[in-house]
Every structure is written in structure tokens, then in C-alpha cells.
Image (cartoon, rainbow, N blue to C red):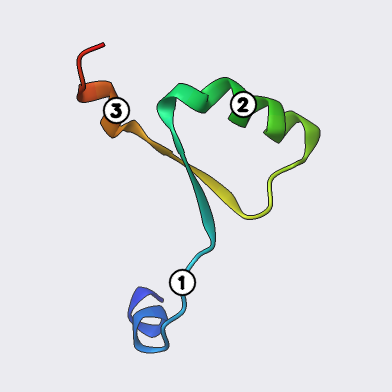
Amino acid sequence: MLEFCAAHAITADVEVLPSTRVPEALARLDKGDVRYRFVLDMSDLDQPR
């Protein structure tokens, strides 16, 4: 399936959110206000606060 998608330029629609917006993501999931999929970008967890 992955090879087929790559050969035909089929991609997934996602909305990328930083990990600091987890509460917003959960609230939107609860309301059904998500069009596609959420992806949480966890790279900001490596940065000092």
C-alpha cells in the first residue's frame, strides 16, 4: 500500500500542532472539530524552558 501511494503521489492530510497545544487538540477532538488528523510535534520537548 505504501508503495502504491508513493507511486501515485497519494498523501494524508494532517494538521500539525506543537505539544504545547495538547489541551486545545483534546478540546477540538471532543467537539468533533477536527478535519483529517492531528499530528503532535514533540520536537519542542527537547528545548529548555
Q: In 3D space, how far apart are the residues under numbered discs 3 and 1 (Cα atoms)? A: 25 Å
**Could you tell me if the residues under marks 2 and 3 are in contact, i.e. CB atoms within 8 Å?**
no
- The residue under the point 33% across, 80% down is 3
Mark sitting earlier along the chain (2/3): 2
Residue 32 numbered mark, or none? none
Q: Based on the displayed image, in which of its 4 quarters is residue 43 positioned?
A: top left
Seen in the image, is 3 located left or right of residue 33? left
Kindly identify the amino acid type of the residue bearing the numbered disc 1: Thr
Residue nearest the observer in this picture, 1 or 35:
35
Mark sitting earlier along the chain (3/1): 1
Q: Nearer the viewer, mark 2 or mark 1?
A: 2
- The residue under the point 62% across, 26% down is 24
User: Badge 1 is on which residue?
Assistant: 11
Q: In 3D space, how far apart are the residues under numbered discs 2 and 1 (Cα atoms)? A: 25 Å
**Local SS, label 2:** helix
Residue 44 numbered mark, or none? 3
Q: Position of residue 14 (x, y in %)?
A: 52, 55
**Local SS, label 3:** helix
Residue 24 numbered mark, or none? 2
Q: Position of residue 33 (x, y in %)?
A: 75, 42
Quarter of the image where the N terminus is located: bottom left
**Local SS, label 1:** loop
Q: Based on the displayed image, in which of its 4 quarters is residue 44 positioned?
A: top left
Kindly identify the amino acid type of the residue bearing the numbered disc 2: Glu
Is residue 4 depicted above or below 37 in this figure? below
Q: In 3D space, how far apart are the residues under numbered discs 2 and 3 (Cα atoms)? A: 16 Å
Q: Nearer the viewer, mark 3 or mark 1?
A: 3
